[in-house]
Amino acid sequence: MNDFEDDEAAKEQARICNGLWVTVHYRLFDAQGEPLEEQTRELTYLHGGFGAILPKLEEVLDGRAAGESVSVRLEPDDAFGDYDAGRLMIVPRERFPGELEPGMVFEGIPGAEPDGELYTVTDIAQGQVVLDGNHPLAGIGVRFDIDVVSMRAASEDEIAAERLARGD
């Protein structure tokens, strides 16, 4: 549903632009076309550089209308970044809670100053834990298949709240 539903002429002319809440459905694939997730996801974001969507995706969606579909291939630089081996950390096991297994994610490194980063446990051996601070999709090209579902105008209060949340 969107603000343009009652006015057919406006609905036909409505295009994604800054200041609109946009709802999309998307599927994510690796560079070989294999699905990275089993199901379609829904995302609603405020269009206009507020950081809730990758900048290249927002650029591709700009000017599209509800009902349109697009497939976008992104290299690591435009998606989740290159893999950085320097973001691997080895931390003593005793800094972690009793239950610990690969795949668990921690905000910050246990026992260290908070840094706001997410770290994934990749290995546990000989009293040490290997943490990876890279995004799980870092270093790979991806493809997004996106369907534009709807859009609606954002209020001034909503725009102000998004700016505040972003720190602008």
Image (tube, rainbow, N blue to C red):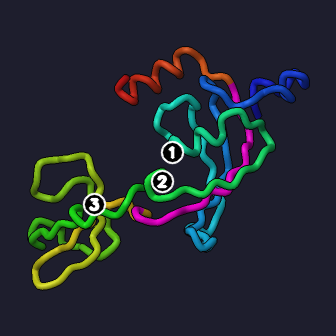
- Horizontal side of residue 77 vs 42, given as left or right: left
Q: Secondary structure at mark 3?
A: loop
Label disc, if present, on residue 40 of the rendered structure: none
> How far is the residue under mark 3 from the one under mark 2?
16 Å
- Give the side of residue 99 with respect to residue 168, left or right: left
Q: Do residues under tags 1 and 3 come within 8 Å of each other at their CB atoms?
A: no
Q: Quadrant of residue 137?
A: bottom left
According to the picture, the residue beneath numbered tag 2 turns out to be: 79
Of pointers 3 and 2, the one earlier in the residue sequence: 2
Q: Nearer the viewer, residue 133 or 154?
A: 133
> Which image quadrant for residue 47?
top right
Residue 109: give x, y in percent of width and height. Answer: 18, 58
* Location of residue 150 (image quadrant): top right
Asked whether disc 2 touches disc 1, contact meaning CB atoms under 8 Å apart, the reply is yes
State whether residue 75 is above or below residue 153. below
The residues colored magenta run 138-152
Q: Which residue is mark 3?
A: 133
Mark 1: few, some, or many residues within 10 Å (few <14, many ≥20)?
some
Q: Which residue is painted at 80% across and 43% down in the image?
A: 67
Distance of label 1 from label 3 (alpha carbons): 19 Å
x then y, percent, for residue 114: 17, 47
Mark 2 secondary-structure assignment: loop
Position of the C terminus by quadrant: top left
Residue lying farthest to the top in this orientation: 156
Pointer 1 or 3: first along the chain: 1
- Residue that label 1 marks: 54
